[in-house]
Every structure is written in C-alpha cells, then in structure tokens.
Image (cartoon, coloured by chain):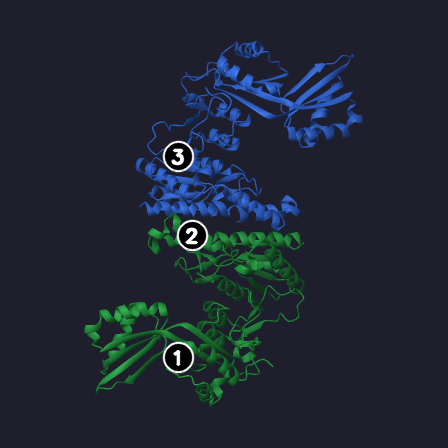
Chain colours: A green, B blue
Amino acid sequence: MERTVLKFGGTSVADLERIHHVADIVAMRAQQTPRLAVIVSAMAGETNKLVTYAQKAGADQLSPSDYEDEYDVIVASGEQVTAGLLALALRQRGYKARSWLGWQLALQTNMAHGSARITGFEGDAFPDAVDSGEIAVIAGFQGVTGKNRISTLGRGGSDTSAVAVAAALSAKSCDIYTDVDGVYTTDPRIVTKARRIEKISYEEMLEMASLGAKVLQTRSVELAMNHKVPIRVLSSFKGLVDEDNSGTLVCDEDYIVEKQIVSGVAYSRDEAKVTLFGVADTPGMASRIFSLLAAAGVNVDMIVQANARGPALANMVFTCTSKHSTLAEDALNRARDEINFEALEVNTDVAKVSIIGVGMKSHTGVAETMFRALYEKGINIDVIATSEIKISILIEAAYTELAVRALHTAFGLDAA
Amino acid sequence: MERTVLKFGGTSVADLERIHHVADIVAMRAQQTPRLAVIVSAMAGETNKLVTYAQKAGADQLSPSDYEDEYDVIVASGEQVTAGLLALALRQRGYKARSWLGWQLALQTNMAHGSARITGFEGDAFPDAVDSGEIAVIAGFQGVTGKNRISTLGRGGSDTSAVAVAAALSAKSCDIYTDVDGVYTTDPRIVTKARRIEKISYEEMLEMASLGAKVLQTRSVELAMNHKVPIRVLSSFKGLVDEDNSGTLVCDEDYIVEKQIVSGVAYSRDEAKVTLFGVADTPGMASRIFSLLAAAGVNVDMIVQANARGPALANMVFTCTSKHSTLAEDALNRARDEINFEALEVNTDVAKVSIIGVGMKSHTGVAETMFRALYEKGINIDVIATSEIKISILIEAAYTELAVRALHTAFGLDAA
C-alpha cells in the first residue's frame, strides 16, 4: 500500500487563505494517492509571538534547563492549531481527515527540550488510520518525551518530523512544499542563469545545506539519507495544475543516472578567518589549540598550517562563523601564555565559495578548472579545503558574486 | 496533607502583566499552603480568535459532529499556552512548577466534543507531583476522550475543571479568582446598597447562577455540591495583602449557621411569555403541547393554566428565553390544527425577578412580604412560580429595577 508524506512550512500556512490553498493541493494529491500524511508548521509569525510570550513570562531570566520544557509546551501549540485548521479545511472539501499531535502519534524523543532528537514511534493507531484512507494532518516540530511531556525538535524541526514520519510509514516519497520551487544550481539572486536541479544526491544536498543553501534543514537530509527516504522539494505557491512544479528530487546517488561533475555552487558570507602567527611547530600544538577552541564552543571549519618565517615556527589558519570568531579570539587570548603565539588576527571580510558534485569522485581536473576560472577573473584564493564531493575556497568578500558567477559558467551550469 | 486548588479566568490572565500578577498571588498562597494546583483559562480574547479561525477554516460549513473534535484541538491550545506561561512566571520567582494538559492529568471525558462531561481521573503522577510540593499549573477547560483525543468542556469549562481537580485531590477548598470580589445579594449596578454575601449554600448559588448571576457556571456548582467541594469566589484584581479579599464561600447548607431567609435577589430580562388562548381543557392536552415544545428544543420555565372565558376552554401560559420563543411560536403554529387554540401571543417585554434563600424552607410569610413590597410600588405580578428555596415572578420589563430594589430593601439586604 503506497503511502505519501507531504509537508508545508510556515509561509505556506501563513493565514486562512493560504491554509485553504494548501487544502486544495492536498485534495489534488489525495486523488492520486489515497494514503496521505501531511505535516504542517505553525502559521508564519506565530512561533515568534509565542517565543516572545515565553521570554516575557520569565524565560529571559531563567537558564535554558529551567525553562525549555515549558517553552516547548507553549511553542508547540502553534502547530497544533494549524493541524486542526487544515483538517477542517479538508473535511469541508469532503475528505476524511484528522489532526495528530506529537503525543498522539506517538513520536518519541529524548529529553533535550527545545532541540529534541527523535528516538522512535509507538503504536499502530496512526499508520492504521492512514491506511484506512483518512488523511493524517500532523503537527510538525513536536514529539513526546519518555516522561510524557511535549518536546520540540528545534527550528526547522518540521522538515525532520516529515522525514521521520515518512520513514515510519515507509512512504514512497516525502514532498516538502516550500516558498521556492526546488533546489537551484546556485542562488538565483546572484546568478540569473541559475537552473533548478532535477535530481540531487543526499550527500550533495547536505553539502549545499551546510554551505548556506537554506532550502532544507541539514538534520532532515541526514535522516532521509539514513532511512533512504526520497525527498522532493517543490513550491506551495505555484498553481495547482502547473506542470512545471516537479521540483527537485533529493535521493540516493544510485538513482541519478546522469551524474553532473558539479551540481551546484554554494557560498556563505558569514565566515571569519583566524590566523595565529608564529606558533611553535611542535607535536601536539595543533591538538592543544583545537581542543581549546572546542571547549570554548567554536565550530572550526577549514584548517591550514604553513611554515612561518622563523625556524620551528608555524602560522595556523582556521575559519569559523563570524559569531564564533569572537569566542575563538577570547579563548586564544586567555591561553596566550600557554600557546605562546606571536600575533592573532581575525578577518571577517571573507567569504566561502564551494562547488559540489558527486561526479567529482570519478573526474580529474575539477580543481584545475575551478582555479583557472577564478584566476581569469583576477580573484585571489586565500584558503582551500576539499572533500570527496566538494571544493571550498576562502576569498575576499567583495569578490563573492563574481566568483559564484564565474564558477557557474565554468562548470556548464548556466541555463540555455 | 492539605491541598488547595486555585482557578484564574480569562480576564485574570489577559496579558503578560496580568499573568505576572497571578504568579504573585499564587506565590503568596504557596507560602501558606505548600500543596497547590492552579487552573488557568486562555488569555482573554484568545479563545474567540481561535474559534474564528476554526470557522474560517471550514467549520462554518460543516455540521457540529463533523467539526467539533478538531475545534477542540484548536481551541484547547489557548489554555495550553497560559499554563506554560504561568509555570515559567512561577519558576522565575523561585518556585517549583510545571504545566499539566488535559491528556497528561489524565482528565477523562466522554466523547461529547465541545461540551464534554468529565468521567474520571487516571494515574497517580499528578497528585504525586502536587504532594511533592511542585505547583501544578493546569490547562483548564480541556480533557481527553477514550479515543485519546482532546476534548473541551464548553464555555466556562475552566470552573468545572477546577472543581473536578479539587474533588480528585480532596482539596480543602477550590478558590475561583475572578473579576468580581464575590457573590452579591443582587446586581450592584442596579442596587448600590447590594452587599457581598459571606457564605451561600450550593442550592442557593445554583438558583442565583441559573437566574442570571453570572459569577459561576451552573455545572461547576452542581459538581461541587455532589463532591462537597467548598468553592470560594474572590477577586484577582485586588491588592495582594488586601484584607477584604475574603470573597464568598459557596458551601454545604450545614456549614451556614446564620441562615438568611432571603440571601439574594436575582433577575433576568431575557424572558418571553407565551400565551395560548382558548385551548380545549381536556386530559392530555398539556402533555401534548409540552412534548411538542420539547421536540422543538424549547426550554420551558414557568407554566400557568387558567380557565378561559368559554366552557371547557383554558388559557395556557408559559415562559422561556426570548430566543426560544421564536422556536415555540413556529412549532405551535405548525401544530395549530392539532392543538386547535384560538390565538397565540408572544410577549418579550417581560422580566423575571426572584428571591432566593434556604431560610424560606422554615419561614412562613415570605411570599406575603414579597407581594406586599411589589404592591406598594404599584408593580403588577403576571406569573408566579415557586420552589423550596425561591419565589419567581414575571413582571413588565420596565419595572425590573424598581422591583429588585424594593425586594432588596424588604428582605433586609441593604448594606448599612
């Protein structure tokens, strides 16, 4: 029995008019697939309103462990309302439908209120209801802990709910309706010739997501990859019979016959480059520096070590987000006596540009093509980092758009 | 181990400022009584907003049985938010507190969504938590059905929740904080000398409530009477150390030593008098008329039958609410051939005024005092109805205030 999961985010259910539009989409889908589960977010703005209430009620003066459980009770009400409203809108159209809350599913999570992780599903009532042909409208973003309390999955958690439900139902696909019509080869605001990608592998999508393409939450893609749930990203704003709303399929690499060498170009401006000049080039020094940074809560991205001018001295370069660079600077300065570096420099006027593609694994000359394209535009490369399916470079922030456009053209991604 | 239940209605938790004020009251009470359960309503206006959403989502085009379950999911979110917020405000003041939703309690109800009746409590987690000294902040108005779905108890259901929780906890008292400081001998807007009643019996309160004094929901008083839970009505708007906030105690008649002959004067303007002229005075006629009215959904209040001018003819007079009088008129006119009355008259320009008091049971001359007081003011009595603890009269609406004031004085209720 084929089951399908659909998910609609906050902007797709922003008001009653939009909720009725979503009901039209779901009704259309129900005619093709009789076994449907629909995950909904809170109406846009509602979650922020509830968070503000919680802050004003006292959360702003409490430590997270003292407020997060109640915060979840308050915030989870937003999705509860949307689920009830969409169920009504579907019934008004003559469909059988009912709402399901996290505790009713029961979508079990750990005790990490505010950013809980899903640990499993309980009971058969929910899959049985779906198989009976009743459309299940699920309040996303929420679950229930072992102590029978409401938990939330953190920002973007509704995508994760949707994939978890799809996995539990062994759904044919998990269709994420959003305010864009798919995943693009790069940011269309920068490159007008950006193209929608038809199919992209989980690994590529993970790199795209973590590198700044904000279409899908990283956690939901990881979960989909682990459970081999195909995700389709498509638009909830397009017309109902718009033939071009096929979106982007995020799936296992094996299902992608024509592998692109490079599938997309991503960029991020929220970067900082931290340089430690004149560090002693002794064993264990790198380990000491990076364990110190980890303790300070700094997520380090790229790392480069180079010889410095003096003997037995090295320059240590790493990148992190701008926000984390302040933490890094403080931690390193406090440990100056221990590490004994000559100087510390933080530069936030940098950007990271990356090319991503599973085809890279089996093709040579990709890096050369990238570096030549940048050289021809006179762009200086500061730091380079590579993985199996991506190459990232750090450049001066002012060159971001120029670099993205040059790479998009160089790898044949421009739309005809 | 003495337990106390407090309840705060919608106007008492209307915004964050009011919620903090409620937290101050609860904190003060917690210092006197360490075992506390607090029932809260939705923030004023929130329930109406959610009802409007539900209507616009499709409820307005569905029959109640097709929308009430989802309506409950949507509307119950209002109390959920308040419960979380008050728990936070109490924690910020250094108290242990947590929210409890209907399904967590578990407050079991029947399947009558929208106006469910409580059938019982399950589990020990909740009383155990209260006994541990953690303040239980309970989302009022809601329960859970045997099918594990959210139910609501209908308008004013939070009072009923509070009494049910008090009964389940064998609480010493159930204190209903509201926007008035108690139950008055009559409406202070009409009689400036109206006094706050210190103690009133359940039976008297039931008559007061059903006769138009809107302080407490009738259902909650019935439940309190059945479980012998003392209710105290007091103000959430008075100062925290205001000595005069002792409110009104609603309790068993046995606890009232000094019984007033008349405790209060109630009135209702939402009345209609329906007269059927010239009905055949045969056995079974009354039964036929009133079963017909019952089938039409008319709640009949007072009934009088009098001889009419012709032989074997009677005039049948009854009263009901103005709204129901239209139903009654339609039903009777449709059955005109069967009942064969001469004429039908509906008069909505009437009011009902009642005196209520358990002392009436053991005192004579109460009716005489009442009728004389009205006669002296030139007020004509149209219909009279009596019960063990009340006498009601129907009069011309214009005389309402005059009658209420005259009776308030005649029975010695005026404040010094």
Please, what is the three-letter code of the amino acid marked with disc 2?
Answer: Thr
Q: Residue at x 46, y 38 (%)?
A: B11
Q: Is residue A208 above or below residue B11?
A: below
Q: Which residue is mark 1?
A: A394
Q: Residue at x 49, y 51 (%)?
A: A77
**Tag in front: 3 or 1:** 1
Please, what is the three-letter code of the amino acid marked with disc 3?
Answer: Ala
Q: Is residue A259 left or right of residue B169?
A: right
> For mark 2, does the 10 Å Cα neighbourhood hold few (<14), some (14 to 19), or many (20 or more) residues?
some
> Circle 1 — which element?
strand
Residue that lies at the very extreme toward the right in this rendered image = B337
Residue that lies at the very extreme toward the left in this rendered image = A337
Q: Residue at x 67, y 54 (%)?
A: A93
**Tag in front: 1 or 2:** 1
Q: Is residue B142 left or right of residue A2?
A: left
Q: Is residue A163 visible?
A: yes
Q: Is residue B187 above or below residue B98?
A: above
Q: Tell me residue B341's x, y (percent).
A: 77, 21
Disc with the residue nearer the chain's start (1 vs 2) = 2
Q: Tell me residue A102's x, y (percent).
A: 49, 56
Q: Are marks 2 and 3 in contact (CB under 8 Å)?
A: no
Q: Which mark, residue A52?
A: 2
Please, what is the three-letter code of the amino acid marked with disc 1?
Answer: Leu
Q: Tell me residue A179's x, y (percent).
A: 55, 65
Which chain is indicated by disc 1? A
